[in-house]
Image (cartoon, rainbow, N blue to C red):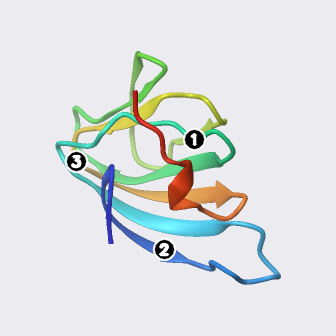
Amino acid sequence: MPCPCGQARRAFAGIPEFPGTLHITEISEDAKRHYHRRLTETYVILECGPDAAMELDGERIPVQPLQSFVIPPGVRHKAVGRMKVLIVVLPEFDPADEWFD
């Protein structure tokens, strides 16, 4: 499904044994900076180009495969460059909790 970052496949929504959701997301070149008020996301970089980066509250951090980032509520974030990421969202993802400046 489309998301602010590109295209996402989401799993485990509504599963009582798991309090969150897992997403495999293909980041597009036009990913949008956003934040969450309640959700914590953990990004695990699976694949990326040599110029890929994560932008966290305006700071751009170069990334490499298998690097991970915990993104607490309120942190404005955006993936920069094409990459494939695994995102663990706690609690369960809620599309109403995606905010843009």
Mark found first going from the N terminus, 2 or 3:
2
Mark 1 vs mark 3, foreground winner is 1
Quadrant where the N terminus sits is bottom left
Instruction: Describe the element under mark 1 as helix, strand or loop.
Output: loop
Quadrant where the C terminus sits is top left
Separation of disc 1 and disc 3 at Cα? 22 Å
- Count neighbours of disc 2 (C-alpha within 10 A) and say few if under 14, some if 14 to 19, many if 20 or more: some
Q: Position of residue 86 (x, y in %)?
A: 49, 60
Separation of disc 1 and disc 2 at Cα? 17 Å
Separation of disc 2 and disc 3 at Cα? 19 Å
Comparing 31 with 59, the one in front is: 31
- The correct choice, above or below, for 99 with respect to 12 in the image is above
Amino acid at circle 3: Arg
Amino acid at circle 2: Arg
| Residue assigned mark 1 | 36
- The correct choice, above or below, for 52 with respect to 9 in the image is above
Q: Is residue 94 left or right of residue 29?
A: right
| Residue assigned mark 2 | 10
Mark found first going from the N terminus, 1 or 2:
2
| Residue assigned mark 3 | 82
From this viewpoint, which residue is outermost toward the left? 29
- Asked which quadrant contains residue 8, the reply is bottom left
- Asked which quadrant contains residue 50, the reply is top left
From this viewpoint, which residue is outermost toward the top? 59
